[in-house]
Image: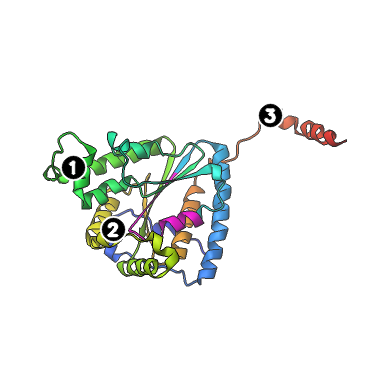
């Protein structure tokens, strides 16, 4: 497969989501895209093994997108060749009672990857400037000093949140976490078709929620919030990538390709060298083991 050009998807300047494409197929069939992904994820798996042995970086992969944008299946397919010890998936839903007793970043901070491992956030800390901005009443459940009613949640409040998120990401990046943020950019029509599929296919019914339709009515509000969040928080150390998501197989290839190409730029990630003393005695160690069967 031709190399995916990272700069085509990375956000370095302010964008308008309405002008970004939601579809890509690279002029390939689904079978060809599936084969491309198999090759890329095999190389990703090998890199993950080396990252684990190197033990100095953690990798944080953040996935955001509207309902039905394909986050779950992307995780399943892109990370299929990883050693299970080296990747942990966190799906962040409504905060628990314990989580609400802490600041909104706490539950994300404790889920960050260990050095040598990947953490995948399926929905992320950005929910705190997305769903809460569309539904500001949710903020009241956080019991923040000075926030007694929705009227207290002004523009300065959101600007502070963007600053806090930027500070959080800068801090973890400076301490060895490699950050990738992907927005799966789905069209409203494609979401409609996917929701209909959940209703038409009995085996998919369990995925449907009446709440999906309520949130769909707020499509424009969500698009505005996503656009603002991406524009305010896409940084060199924590870039956003806007990935066309109407074609799931192409979206998986794009995400996997971006991860592989960007990670390979870290030339210091190498398998550790054996101590000279051990290296000098490899032959004797081998002979010792071989003699056990004599």
Horizontal side of 201 relative to 51 (left or right) equals left
Circle 2/circle 3 CB separation < 8 Å: no
Is residue 199 in sight in this rendering?
yes
Q: Which residues are magenta?
A: 60-77
Name the side, left or right, on which 171 lies relative to 275: left
Tell whether label 3 touches label 1 (CB within 8 Å): no
Q: Count residues near mark 1 (Cα–Cα under 10 Å), then give few for <14, some for 14-19, many for 20+.
A: few
| CA gap, disc 1 and disc 2 | 27 Å
Cα separation, mark 2 vs mark 3, equals: 62 Å
Task: Tell me where residue 171 appears, x and y as whole percent.
Answer: 35, 36
Identify the residue under disc 1: 157
Residue placed under numbered mark 2 in the picture:
211
Q: Is residue 137 left or right of residue 112?
A: left
Label 3 residue SS: helix
Task: Name the residue at the right extreme.
Answer: 294
> Which mark, by number, is residue 276?
3
Q: Residue at x 32, y 40 (%)?
A: 96
Coordinates of residue 172 in the picture (x, y in percent):
38, 37
Count of labels in the image? 3
Is residue 65 rendered magenta in the image? yes
Q: Is residue 126 above or below residue 100?
A: below
Tell me the mark number nearer the camera, choosing from 2 and 3.
2
Q: Residues within 10 Å of mark 2 (few under 14, many from 20)?
A: few
């Amino acid at each position: 497969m031709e190399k995916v050009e990272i700069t085509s998807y990375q956000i370095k300047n302010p964008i308008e989501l309405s002008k970004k494409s939601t579809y890509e197929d690279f002029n390939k069939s689904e079978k060809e895209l599936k084969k491309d992904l198999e090759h890329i994820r095999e190389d990703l798996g090998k890199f993950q093994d080396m990252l684990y042995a190197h033990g100095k970086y953690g990798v944080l992969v953040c996935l955001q997108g509207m309902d039905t944008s394909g986050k779950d299946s992307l995780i399943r397919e892109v990370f299929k060749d990883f050693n299970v010890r080296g990747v942990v998936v966190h799906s962040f839903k409504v905060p628990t009672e314990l989580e609400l007793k802490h600041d909104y970043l706490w539950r994300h901070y404790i889920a960050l990857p260990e050095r040598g491992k990947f953490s995948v956030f399926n929905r992320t800390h950005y929910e705190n400037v997305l769903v809460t901005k569309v539904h500001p009443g949710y903020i009241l459940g956080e019991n923040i000093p000075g926030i007694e009613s929705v009227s207290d949640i002004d523009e300065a409040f959101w600007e502070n949140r963007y600053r806090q998120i930027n500070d959080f990401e800068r801090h973890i990046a400076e301490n060895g976490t490699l950050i990738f943020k992907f927005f799966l950019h789905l069209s409203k029509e494609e979401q409609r078709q996917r929701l209909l599929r959940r209703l038409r296919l009995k085996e998919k019914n369990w995925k449907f929620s009446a709440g999906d339709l309520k949130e769909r009515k707020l499509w424009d509000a969500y698009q505005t919030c996503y656009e603002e969040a991406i524009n305010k928080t896409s940084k060199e150390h924590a870039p956003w990538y806007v990935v066309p998501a109407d074609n799931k197989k192409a979206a998986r290839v794009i995400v996997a390709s971006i991860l592989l190409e960007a990670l390979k730029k870290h030339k210091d990630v190498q398998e550790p060298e054996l101590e000279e003393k051990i290296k000098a005695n490899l032959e004797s160690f081998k002979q010792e083991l071989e003699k056990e069967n004599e």
